[in-house]
Image (cartoon, helix red, strand yellow):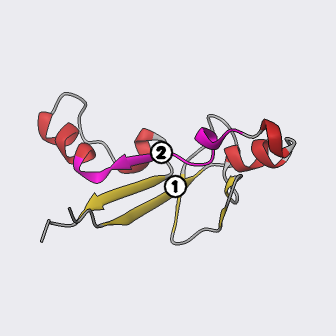
Amino acid sequence: MNLNGTVTGIYITPEPEGEISEVESIEAVAGVGLKGDRNYHKQIKLPVEERKPENECTLVEGESVDELNQSGEFGIIQPGDLRRNLVTEKYPFK
């Protein structure tokens, strides 16, 4: 099975409930998160044994954003509106 994909958007915010910013690139720090994001700032202060991998970064499929927009139930949603760090898209299977 060939599961290829790409990151189509990167979003961060330095503060909880803060404004989301799209960035072109970012440094991902293993065991901590995306440098500059609120979860990175929180994780870096913790001892290594207390850090939570599930807080390093979050993802959303671009296809899911498209489905939400096609449903019309929520109006037009931009990927950053979902407050996830990485937006991904699958490449077609070969």
Image height of 27 relative to 15, above or below: below
According to the image, label 2 marks what residue? 84
Q: Is residue 54 left or right of residue 74?
A: right
- Amino acid identity at mark 2: Arg
Q: Which residues are magenta?
A: 52-63
| x, y percent for residue 23 | 54, 65
Image height of 55 relative to 31, above or below: above
| x, y percent for residue 2 | 22, 66
Image height of 5 relative to 13, above or below: below
Give yes or no for residue 55 being in the magenta stretch: yes
Mark 2 vs mark 1, CA separation in Å: 7 Å
Q: Secondary structure at mark 2?
A: loop
- For the point 13% across and 34% down, which residue is it? 71
- Crowd band around label 1 with a 10 angstrom C-alpha radius: few (<14), some (14–19), many (20+): many
| x, y percent for residue 93 | 14, 66
Residue 3, located in which quarter of the rendered image? bottom left
Residue 76, located in which quarter of the rendered image? top left
How many labels were placed on the picture? 2
- For the point 65% across and 68% down, which residue is it? 27
Which disc number belongs to residue 74?
none
Q: Secondary structure at mark 1?
A: strand
Which disc number belongs to residue 11?
1
Q: Is residue 8 left or right of residue 17?
A: left
User: N-terminal of the two: label 2 or label 1?
Assistant: 1
Foreground pick, 26 / 80: 26
- For the point 70% across and 57% down, which residue is it? 36
